[in-house]
Image (spheres, rainbow, N blue to C red):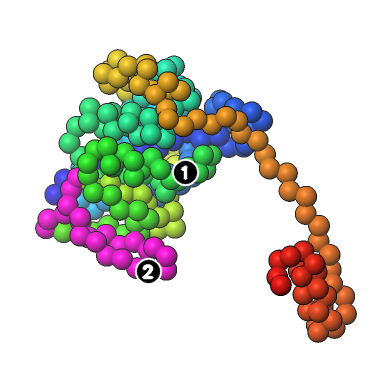
Amino acid sequence: MSVHIIVCIKSVVKAAPQGMAKRTPENSALNPFDRPALEAALEIRERHGGSVTVLTMGPPVSMEVLAEAQAMGTDRAVLVSDRALAESDTLVTSKVLATAINKIGTFDLLFFGTRTADSDTGQVGPQTAALLDIAFVSSVKTITAQEEGWEIERTMDAWEENWQVASPMAATIDPRAFAPRPVGLVGISRVYEEPAIEQWSLTDLGLKAEEVGLMGSPTRVAALEQIKRNRKCDMLEGTPQEQVAELMARLTKMGAID
């Protein structure tokens, strides 16, 4: 059995900026929720053979996260980068990824992180699966190969679910289910000595500028800003009974309870 797995990852902004987000090498990193998805793909490849392709869409700085994924042990890396893609929303991002996936070719499994650490929408995985018209399962904990397809276990709202799904299929990976392997010096050395990241533009994908970016996006981010929380902590004195009475009085005065 040989399996081709595609993992979609993202270069995220590490700290919330003031105003619009701009990714630079200093403030960018591999989305932490993508690491378990990469690990899941690598473990499946180790059990069954095959290959792992890692794909991302973003500015040139995104090559750094692809290099990190390659250092972990992925076989192929593809960056979709074009100035016209700037400020694309999740729907356009999903459209571009789906087009790139079709260009990559036949695959068995398509993995995403559950969400991203910057925008935190969790929309790209299911939207991409819908555009590809393939089955999608979220929050996957285990994936076991069967004679025809895959047996999948996931936890949702404190319920454990088991699914039988045929290839090709897409999934988001539960971040607690797979512990990402460390990136070793040998892997880092191999990647930077023999860089092999493919770069595709809109022309390579057959897409037009008006289909992507702000022009093609039905939604847009106006700005990003840090939320200031002014909180005050009061320590209630007295016996436990007096503390409860004081707390109830304060909650009543605030209108939190009747």
The residue furthest right is 238
Q: Quadrant of the C terminus?
A: bottom right
Q: Main secondary structure of the magenta part?
A: strand
Horizontal and vertical percent position of residue 232: 81, 57
Of helix, strand and loop, which one carries label 2?
Answer: strand
202 is higher (above) or lower (below) than 250: above
62 is higher (above) or lower (below) than 48: above
Name the disc covering residue 236, or none: none
Q: In the image shown, does 255 or 19 lie closer to the viewer?
A: 255
Give the alpha-carbon distance from disc 1 to disc 2, as whole Å: 23 Å
Residue at the image position 27 percent from the left and 29 percent from the top: 99
Residue bearing mark 2: 159
Residue at the image position 64 percent from the left and 32 percent from the top: 17
Reading the chain from its start, which is encountered first: label 1 or label 2?
1
Residue at the image position 30 percent from the left and 62 percent from the top: 153
Q: Over which residues does the magenta segment extend?
A: 147-168
User: Is residue 198 in view?
Assistant: yes
Residue bearing mark 1: 121
Q: Is residue 29 left or right of residue 163?
A: right
Q: Is residue 60 left or right of residue 166?
A: right
Horizontal and vertical percent position of residue 168: 19, 45
Q: In the image shown, does 191 or 155 lie closer to the viewer?
A: 155
Residue at the image position 28 percent from the left and 42 percent from the top: 129
Horizontal and vertical percent position of residue 102: 22, 31
Residue type, label 2 = Trp
Determine which quarter of the picture holds residue 165.
Answer: bottom left
178 is higher (above) or lower (below) than 207: below
Determine which quarter of the picture holds residue 218.
Answer: top left
Residue type, label 1 = Thr
